[in-house]
Image (tube, grey):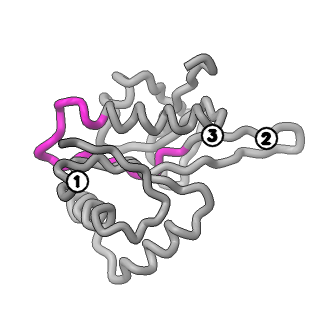
């Protein structure tokens, strides 16, 4: 059976195992995983949605955070998709779209209707799911920024 669970404590062993697989697949290797989990737990507002098969195998996850953009006149809350991964065996059958929709709905419940992310691997996926390239926003990681504006009546 497939279950979707939201977590805020990144010491969850299923999340940690999946995140390590994601980093390994991306060619990123860390010396101190405990420091990463601690940082994730300390970052305000972080949440992840895990899609799990039979209570033991992670199909994928999406890691998100509400962020705020401020100027002297305006403040805007945005949803930030920090990390997103579906295990290779489960790609191409709708799990990614399902996780993305759950994250979007979670943001909408917080009255956040602009979602932002960067990607270097899944441009077509995000375009297919209603995101647009936003070349006027520059990301620190220099990757293309994608934005989705959602109507408030979802």
Closer to the observer: label 1 or label 2? Answer: 1
Assign a secondary structure to mark 3: strand
Q: Which stretch is magenta?
A: 80-96
Q: Provide residue 60's location: percent of width, then percent of height.
A: 27, 48
Residue in view at x 63 percent, y 38 percent: 110
Q: Is residue 54 left or right of residue 79?
A: left
**Residue 102 occupies which quadrant of the picture?**
top left
Q: Which residue is mark 2?
A: 75
Q: Secondary structure at mark 1?
A: strand
Q: Residue at x 33, y 76 (%)?
A: 30
Whole-number angstrom distance, CA of label 1 to CA of label 3: 27 Å
Other residues around mark 2 within 10 Å, as few (<14) / some (14–19) / many (≥20): few
Question: Quadrant of the rendered structure where residue 151 is?
Answer: top right
State the quadrant of the C terminus. top right
- Mark number displayed over residue 126: none
Real-space CA distance between mark 1 and mark 2, rounded to the nearest whole angstrom? 36 Å
């Amino acid at each position: 059976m497939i279950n979707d669970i939201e977590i805020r404590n990144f010491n969850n062993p299923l999340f940690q195992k999946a995140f390590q697989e994601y980093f390994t697949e991306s060619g990123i290797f860390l010396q101190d995983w405990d420091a990463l989990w601690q940082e994730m737990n300390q970052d305000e507002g972080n949440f992840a949605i895990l899609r799990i098969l039979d209570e033991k195998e992670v199909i994928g996850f999406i890691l998100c955070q509400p962020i705020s953009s401020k100027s002297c006149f305006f403040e805007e809350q945005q949803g930030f998709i920090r990390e997103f991964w579906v295990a290779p065996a489960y790609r191409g059958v709708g799990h990614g779209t399902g996780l993305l929709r759950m994250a979007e709905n979670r943001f909408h419940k917080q009255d956040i209707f602009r979602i932002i992310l960067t990607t270097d691997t899944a441009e077509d996926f995000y375009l297919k799911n209603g995101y647009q390239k936003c070349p006027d926003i520059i990301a620190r990681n220099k990757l293309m920024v994608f934005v989705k504006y959602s109507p408030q009546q979802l």
